[in-house]
Amino acid sequence: MLVIGTAGAKDIANGLGAPMLLLPEASFDESWSQGAELQDWRDRSRRGERHEVVLVLLDASQEAPQPIDDVVFDSWLEDCEAPFAEWFAALGVACQRCVDGGRVIAFVARPRPMESGGWSLAACVADGVETMVRSFGFTTTDRGVRVDLITLPLDDQPWIDVNVVRDRVAMVASSSIGSLVIHEGEH
């Protein structure tokens, strides 16, 4: 097993006894000046040992509720555009580092639909990740790689821990269904 993630995933990787690829934090300004660093990481990280299961765990993109009409351009870049770029890089590397016939399992924080007021940026990121997961799942079918997504409620703190990851990995790994998207806390 390999974990690809941001700094918040280190404890989970350690708890699973899995090696970790640390994704650099993308913090883009209006000119996307740090995009080259993320691309360099992506190019370097595609090479290396392949794993049966590759987990992708990125920190939640939005730390506190904020009314949508109060969102300024800098917040949009930091809490939406930068996480999109991070997820795109991480999922692409995960698919490259997964063995043929293996599984990529992504975990993303998502606000509960009935409690999502003020969490529009986090919801936007989670929806974008779902689209990316489905796209990567389609493009890796020739290799038999399944790309799964598990969304966990953002308002549960912490929204993720090693026991949740271990349980969900076991649940998904036991499934004979192709790529899965599981939304937890949607009721």
Image (cartoon, rainbow, N blue to C red):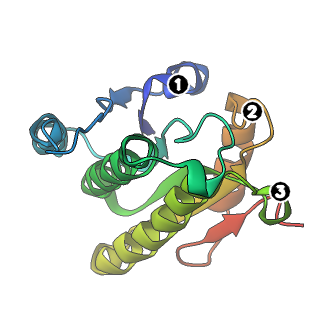
Residue 115's label in the rendered image is 3
Q: Where does label 1 land, which residue?
A: 8
Q: Quadrant of the N terminus?
A: top left
Q: Quadrant of the C terminus?
A: bottom right
Between the C-alphas of marks 1 and 2, the distance is 15 Å
Above or below, 107 relative to 36? below
Q: Secondary structure at mark 2?
A: helix
Q: Where does label 2 land, which residue?
A: 163
Residue 52: x, y in percent? Answer: 42, 50
* Labelled pair 1, 2 in contact (Cβ < 8 Å): no
| Mark before the other along the chain sequence, 2 or 3 | 3
Seen at 60% across and 59% down, the residue is 123
The three-letter code of the residue at mark 3 reads Glu
Between the C-alphas of marks 1 and 3, the distance is 24 Å
Dot in front, 1 or 2: 1
Seen at 28% across and 29% down, the residue is 24
Seen at 31% across and 58% down, the residue is 95
Q: Sort mark 3 into few (<14), some (14-19) or many (20+) by Cα contacts within 10 Å.
A: few
Residue 185's label in the rendered image is none
